[in-house]
Image (cartoon, rainbow, N blue to C red):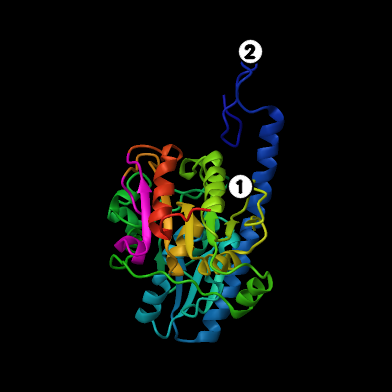
Amino acid sequence: MSNWFGIKIAGPSNGSTEGPTFQELWRYRYQKSIHLLERYRSASAKYRHLKQIKKKIGNRPLIAIILSEQMGDIIACEPIAREVRQRHPDGYIIWVVREPFAELVKYNPNLDEYLVEKCPGERVQLLQSGIYDKVYNMHISHRKCKYCPEDPINPTADAIGLTFDNYYHRGDLLYIFSQAAGLPAMTAEPKMYILESVRQKIAGLQLPAGPIVIHCQSSHILRDWPADNWNKLVRWLIATYPYPIIEVGLAPTVTEPNPQFRSLCGQLSLLETAEVIRQARLFIGIDSGPAHMANATGVDAILLLGKLFDFVDYLPYSGRYKRGEGVTILNDFGHPCAELPYAWVQDAVQQRLGQPKLV
């Protein structure tokens, strides 16, 4: 049987202990109601704000670039903002983004503004309002909000057969999403726009010059390499090379107490993380947002990839890394990143940094 908001629950006479409890169902019902109320308020406020912008800009077109989430996706698709600005030099261009990633577009000189998206349902509501004069939507269809009834559709992506099951078979993220937005397939270099105030803040940390920067954990466990391997690698780096080692990311993986190693995990904003990576002599990491930062800031890198769902031979990066410049990409095809041999990473480091010196 099902309750009124569509969650299946076990009948009282079947003795089943599986499925959500009565308390969980009512908690979901409450959270859904609150979310929908806040969403409609948020969408109405944003619609009024956009109407005021249209009144202010007169005949200039109001243009939306929509790619609201995933750090790496947004960094990889930065060239879209430049392309849209070139196509619409007089346009008032807004990038629609989720709050955690707003910093990545906030200071882009090709944009007039950014708009914080509450959820995909709100996005659908604003698109259906017709408030935008032109839309470049990079999202693939059917990534829904868990509370909203709307199913986000991107007809342009649908027309070229782009789905979550095949997108990485088509090419790198910029190449894919530029086509989903209705633009020609793009292969440009991504850029990071790092404020001088951010650079000064990182300078104030007095980090040692020319570090090896590592990033060990992604938003998805299938992309990760074992913590034991990272700790082993850091111990070997300390014993072999004189360079300082800095870990970045949300949560630390390495537990090495040596003063040559420093963890900045959980201490930096997105742009501050990008600035630390920009100063690195070498970045070592898994497929993640910081890896895209390394690509966008021109840093040499060793990247650890592996099978991701049904994607075996895939490459998320455009620009330098796509051309194989300044990067070593390790992938034991058909195996997840967790099974990537430790020796491969150590050998790649030696090729990038030179043979170790005896100490």
**Quick check: can you spot residue 150?**
yes
Name the residue located 56 percent from the left edge and 62 percent from the top edge.
101
Name the residue located 52 percent from the left edge and 47 percent from the top edge.
233
Q: How many C-alpha atoms fall within 10 Å of the one at disc 2: few (<14), some, or many (≥20)? A: few
SS at circle 1: loop
What x and y, as percent, mark residue 336?
41, 39
Q: Is residue 320 magenta-colored? A: yes
What x and y, as percent, mark residue 303?
42, 53
- The answer to whether 262 appears left or right of 337 in the picture is right
What x and y, as percent, mark residue 333?
32, 41
Q: Reply above or below: 264 against 235.
A: below
Q: Reply above or below: 288 against 130.
A: above
Q: Nearer the viewer, residue 270 or 150?
A: 270
**Quick check: can you spot residue 153?**
no
- The answer to whether 96 appears left or right of 198 in the picture is left
Q: Which mark is residue 15?
A: 2
Give the number of the mark in front: 1 or 2.
Answer: 1
Q: Nearer the viewer, residue 275 or 150?
A: 275
Please, what is the three-letter code of the amino acid marked with disc 1? Val
Q: Which segment did they paint magenta? A: 313-333
Name the residue located 57 percent from the left edge and 44 percent from the top edge.
231
Please, what is the three-letter code of the amino acid marked with disc 2? Gly
What x and y, as percent, mark residue 316?
38, 55
Q: Is residue 284 magenta-colored? A: no
Q: Which mark is residue 254?
A: 1
